Image (cartoon, rainbow, N blue to C red):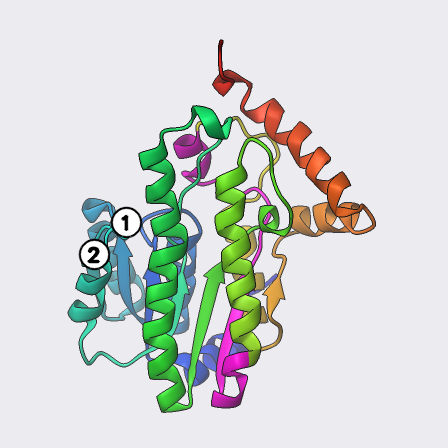
Amino acid sequence: MRFSNHLKQQLLDNYGPWALITGASSGIGQEISRSLAEAGFNLILNGRNEFALNQLSIQLEDQWGIVTDSITADLASTEGITHIINSIGDIPIGLFVASAGFGTSGEFIASDVDQEIEMVQVNTLALMMLTHHFARQFAQNKRGGIILMSSIVGFQGVPNAANYAATKAYVQSLGEGLYHELKPYNVDVLAAAPGPVASGFAQVANMKMGNVLTPKEVVLPILKSLGKKSTVFPGRLTKILILGLRTVPRWGKIRIMKMVMSGMTQHQKVTS
């Protein structure tokens, strides 16, 4: 799939000249940043890794001649979220990409509750607060785009990743609702629900992953779908997984997910 000049110009015309990407220091967020820079967007890059953000900023400015700014902020705190909003100030953001997030895995009762709380704050609360802020701005301007990173695990309960899947269910539901709610304001909302992606997620969640998508494989389908649908399942592997589960009842999907996750997280079982 080619990133055509027509698509680049269309994105820039509809949502430019500035975009904010959270989780930009790695994974899907970083790849989206690269693609938007190629399209000519100026970028506000957010993440926890200040060194990685600065390196990305320098690289994108040198390669594409754009303007960037990096904001190091912890989305697990409301102070971090406020810091992002205040740092942006009057910069005319037209596209918000909520890519920041992390996961946990293993039996819920064996997990560190503080880490579970932090995950809920980053994956849902921070995403909601930033989406609310920019959705208001975009609605007033009658122009804008919002991309929310969901996951195929958000469409059913997932034993051994129960809380993570629940956060993604929230993101998916929010995206679907806002797609219709903001459409009259000429604001496009997209929930992107990929399958397993090679990123820092598996390491943070302490999981062993086999066949996975690369961030590059999912970014272009996401950008092509913005403004055309409420949900995209990016990547060939994602489509195969969705197609295979389409006729399976919800309880069956949960059982399948349990078997898959059990194989990835056996090392985290509770010992009695």
Q: Residue 76 carries which label?
A: 1
Q: Which residue is drawn at 57% across and 25% down?
A: 264
Furthest-right residue in this view? 247
Observer able to see residue 150: no
x, y percent for residue 169: 55, 53
Viewer-nearest residue: 95 or 213: 95
Find the magenta span and give its range.
181-205
Q: Name the spot of residue 17 as percent of width and height, x first.
A: 33, 80
**Against 99, is 93 above or below?**
below
The amino acid marked with disc number 1 is Ala
Whether residue 186 is visible? yes
Q: Does the magenta stretch include residue 194?
A: yes
Residue 99 location in percent, x, y?
Answer: 41, 56
- Residue corresponding to mark 2: 80
Q: Do the residues labelled 1 and 2 touch (CB within 8 Å)?
A: yes
The residue nearer to you, when weighing 2 against 265, is 265
Query: Is label 2 in a helix, a strand or a loop?
Result: helix
The residue most toward the top is 272
Is 108 placed above or below 14 here? above
The quadrant where residue 176 appears: bottom right
Closer to the camera in the image, 248 or 163: 163
